[in-house]
């Protein structure tokens, strides 16, 4: 238990350090890189929750593909748009925080009421086996729905860039 | 004192704390920085905080359905992220700006 506690202490202090760096940097590329480190640390945290498959998906798919795609798309923009990003507090009124506070209150109350007094902690030795069992037996319709949702970005790409190709052909 | 710290980090509170920090980071970046690229990235960070809370609750309550929710949320977040990126790139091609202040493409016509 003490090894787990010490490693979680190190990881959470690293998390807090890079969180502060995100607020400190003014250049967007540096902010993005610190957020990238936060996502990798979150993937490490999934390992401590016995979710090896989620950790692999988080690091390989999310950090390694999606966020790196975002980093490459940042190269499309000129650097003047990305550096010198300042914080604008003046236009935020206190009314903005009312729905956020209500949401947090609702979340805390629901968490407090949802946890039973005595629950039996279960150990899942093989996370992939459990998730695969759920995916292909109980949630098969959700997988088809996800495949449909993931095809939407390709349709959006076609729609947004179709007009330019048509005008270029003319 | 040392035993209390070890007990704190050995339980699930630190995971909930980190997920709350991620959600706070996402919301504050969305509200404070008036930039469209930062806005979509901040929404992704908030999504990840919710994901971590789901995975923690799933582990400590002994129910694997929370990890299923995380998997579904990751896929949907990837799709919405790419669509948001397409919209921002097209918006920049039209307006040559990434600021929130000029975000009135549908609201008013350009004066010619």
Image: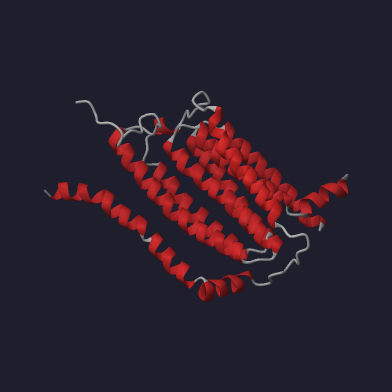
What colour scheme has been applied to the protein in the rendered image? Answer: secondary structure
Residue B88 image offset from top left, x and y in percent: 37, 41
Residue at x-position 59% and y-position 63%? B67
A114 sits to left or right of B41: right
Residue at x-position 24% and y-position 29%? B110
Residue B56 image offset from top left, x and y in percent: 66, 57
In the figure, A17 relative to A118: above or below? above
Query: Is residue B21 visible to the viewer in this orientation of the structure?
Result: no
Residue at x-position 22% and y-position 26%? B111
In the figure, A75 relative to A136: above or below? above
Q: Quadrant of residue A21?
A: top right
Which residue is farthest left? A170
In the figure, A51 relative to B48: above or below? below
Residue A122 image offset from top left, x and y in percent: 72, 69
B76 sits to left or right of A8: left
Residue B45 image offset from top left, x and y in percent: 54, 46
Number of numbered markers:
0
In the figure, A120 relative to A9: above or below? below
Quarter placement of the N terminus of chain B:
top right
A153 sits to left or right of A167: right
A133 or A93: nearer the eye? Answer: A93
Which residue is farthest top? A90
Query: Is residue A75 visible to the viewer in this orientation of the structure?
Result: yes
Quarter placement of the C terminus of chain B:
top left
Residue at x-position 60% and y-position 62%? B66
């Amino acid at each position: 238990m003490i090894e787990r506690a010490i490693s979680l202490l190190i990881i959470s202090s690293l998390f807090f350090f890079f969180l502060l760096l995100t607020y400190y940097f003014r250049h967007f590329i540096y902010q993005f890189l610190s957020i990238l480190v936060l996502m990798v640390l979150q993937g490490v945290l999934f390992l401590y929750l016995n979710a090896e498959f989620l950790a692999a998906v988080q690091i390989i798919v999310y950090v390694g593909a999606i966020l790196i795609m975002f980093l490459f798309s940042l190269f499309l923009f000129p650097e003047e748009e990305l550096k010198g990003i300042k914080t604008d507090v003046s236009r935020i009124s206190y009314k903005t925080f009312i729905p956020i506070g209500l949401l947090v209150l609702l979340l805390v109350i629901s968490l407090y009421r949802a946890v039973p007094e005595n629950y039996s902690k279960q150990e899942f030795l093989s996370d992939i086996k459990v998730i695969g069992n759920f995916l292909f037996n109980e949630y098969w319709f959700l997988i088809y729905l996800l495949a449909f949702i993931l095809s939407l970005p390709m349709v959006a790409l076609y729609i947004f860039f179709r007009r330019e190709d048509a005008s270029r052909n003319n | 004192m040392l035993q209390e710290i070890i007990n704190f980090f050995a339980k699930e509170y630190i995971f909930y704390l980190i997920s709350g920090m991620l959600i706070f980071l996402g919301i504050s970046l969305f509200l404070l920085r008036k930039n469209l690229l930062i806005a979509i990235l901040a929404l992704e960070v908030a999504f990840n905080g919710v994901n971590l809370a789901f995975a923690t609750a799933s582990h400590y309550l002994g129910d694997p359905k929370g990890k299923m929710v995380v998997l579904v949320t990751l896929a949907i977040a990837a799709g919405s992220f790419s669509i948001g990126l397409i919209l921002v790139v097209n918006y920049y091609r039209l307006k040559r700006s990434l600021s929130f202040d000029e975000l009135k493409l549908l609201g008013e016509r350009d004066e010619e």
